[in-house]
Amino acid sequence: MAWSEHASDLPIGHLLRELTPQVLGIVVRRFRDFAAAEDAVQEASMAAVMQWPQHGLPENPRAWLTQVAFRRMTDHIRGESARRRRETEAAEEAARVPVTGFDAVPLEDDTLVLLFLCCHPALAPSSAIALTLRAVGGLTTAEIANAFLVPEATMAQRISRAKQTIKASGIPFQLPNSEERGLRLRSVLHVLYLIFNEGYTATSGPHLRRADLSQEGIRLARVALQLESENSEIAGLLALMLLTDARRHARTGLNDELIPLSQQNRALWDRGQIAEGLALLSAALPKGSLGPYQLQAAIAAVHDEAEHPEDTDWPQILALYELLKRMSDNPMVILNHAIAAAMVHGPKEGLNLLDGLQGEPRIAERHRLDAVRAHLLEMVGDAQAAAKYYLAAAGKAVNLPERNYLLMQAARLASMT
């Protein structure tokens, strides 16, 4: 078995996140059992975490993972007497396509096929998104539960049922035709959006962002756009990701502390990504069929084109959020609309709009509603009330840099009263 020399210096976790969906696709294609294949690939990944730091990185890491997963699947099939027939079929297929070495593993990337498989019509959209986040995006069940605003146990059951539905459906592991892709595309794009967002601002943990996830979201959006090059919403989603991710280097300080948009050093923004995002958006908008991702990309573009915070065209952003509100009842859209309204018409207008979100179960326990209210109260001049809501927001935040930022704002205002 051949190993690379400088393996200990390589980011194994990042590599596994990239390779795992590819290997899962290969294993599902070979054995046609999604649930068992995911378990086998997870075991292979665990073996890699244990062995690679000690022995070095294999010359072909994907092939290594694939062979280990194949062995796990073979053991699984042999261990179940009720599945003897499938064992025979798998053995016959393996004989037809023998795996004699690392180079025998197929070279194609099945990630996109896996993505559409997870989003097939047998699943409810919420289950499809959850399953894809788990299998393709590599998010934990807790992270997915937070994204959907449901308890972790509920999400675990949803993912388990989705796996069983995939298994029972008998749908072949192959890229759907053009008509089927259109039916599943909305769920696929939502998945990519959630993967990117989890990377851009992590649900929890000591760091503000998870660059591996945001980059994976961008990579998968590029793959999807290559498949559907004329689809303006895919282009809009990729543009949104690029225009947002372009600010990543300015979002945190030396100690990973959060720096809000209005205080960022805009010289640190990635102008190359901004240019690419603007080009994608400019090409997509004239094609008609304006969708929510294009609108969000347009909002991000207005922010990115402002050389200084005071140059931001807030009336244009407000108008774009007005359009977006007509397409979606997402409370985060309503929240951002309130911020834009406050910047155009004054903080009292924004506070009035926030009142409409009181009691909204999808956002009531999230820190952002209290944080925005605190910011607008500070703009009004009510430092005491603002400090109170900053503290309330900090109590709900589970991302450490966000929590620290909110606590610092509360302390700053408390010292002024």
Image (cartoon, rainbow, N blue to C red):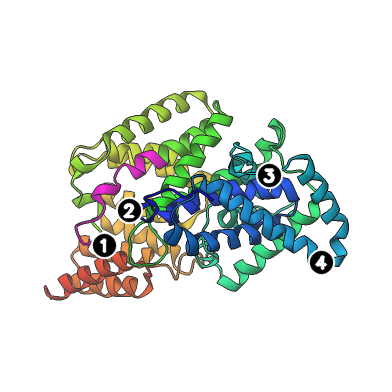
- Labels 4 and 1 touching (C-beta < 8 A): no
Which residue position holds label 4?
A: 80
- Labels 2 and 1 touching (C-beta < 8 A): yes
Which residue position holds label 1?
A: 375
Give the answer, above or below, for where 302 lies relative to 385.
Answer: above
Which amino acid type is marked by label 3?
A: Val
- Dot 2, crowdedness within 10 Å: few (<14), some or many (≥20)? many
Q: Quadrant of residue 255?
A: bottom left
Which stretch did the figure color magenta? 241-257
Which residue position holds label 2?
A: 339
Q: CA distance from mark 2 to mark 1?
A: 9 Å
Residue 412 numbered tag: none
Which amino acid type is marked by label 1?
A: His
Q: Nearer the viewer, residue 380 or 67?
A: 67
Q: Secondary structure at mark 1?
A: helix
The location of residue 48, given as percent across then percent down, is: 51, 59
